[in-house]
Amino acid sequence: MNMDSRGLHRNRLYPPGEAWNMKSQIRRSLHDSDGKGMVGCIIFIVLIGIAIFLSIRLVPIYYTNYTMESEIKIVVSRAGAHYQDDAAITKDVLDIARKNELQIEKKNIQVRRFAGQIFVEVEYAVPVDFGILERNLNFQIKASSVVGTL
């Protein structure tokens, strides 16, 4: 055998009897951590799945709100420049809502004029079905413009 004066193998740093104990300890620790890694992986996959599900449900709604808000600001700016009355502004906002497939009624649109400005406020709710519960997302769009041309 290749042993030195201390009883250690020349190519190993531990006595011959301890080699088996270290290998069995490593095996036990590997077997113990197998389940923990699998559970963590499953939890991670479930969380990623929930995030994808929520984004599929919510991103189109928020995108519609964003585009509707920009279109309403354009309509209000034109209304101020062309001296449109409140009924025409309300009709334009309802047309935008219909184009974006939103259920908005006249009572949800407020047009106010104050100190040479037009203020338009639109409030609406969009129902979202999450499978186990249904919630309404409430949105409020505010736009204003100066009456007259610059």
Image (tube, rainbow, N blue to C red):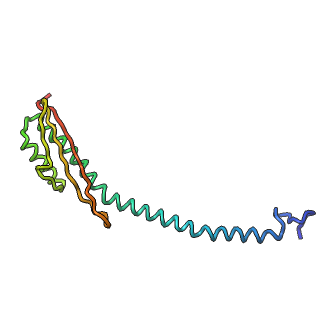
Residue 118, quarter of the rendered image:
top left
Name the quarter where the N terminus is drawn: bottom right
Residue located 6% across and 39% down the image? 85
- How many tags in the picture? 0
Between 117 and 9, the one nearer to me in the picture: 117
Residue 67, above or below 49: above
- In the rendered image, residue 29, in percent from the top left (x then y), is placed at 66, 67
For image coordinates 15% across by 41% down, the residue present is 75
Compared with 123, 11 (above or below) is: below
Q: Is residue 57 above or below residue 146?
A: below
Work out which residue is located at the far right of the displayed protein and give it.
5
Q: Position of residue 89 (x, y in %)?
A: 10, 43
Please give the name of the residue rendered at 18% of the width and 37% of the height, measured from the top-left corner: 144
The quarter in which the C terminus is drawn is top left
Instruction: Give the percent coordinates (x, y) of residue 79.
Output: 11, 38
When asked about the image quadrant of residue 56, the answer is bottom left
Task: Please indicate whether residue 26 sits to the left or right of residue 118 in the image.
Answer: right
Residue at position x 14%, y 46% in the image: 109
Left/right of residue 51 with respect to residue 126 in the rendered view:
right
Work out which residue is located at the far top of the displayed protein and give it.
150
Q: Is residue 39 left or right of residue 53?
A: right
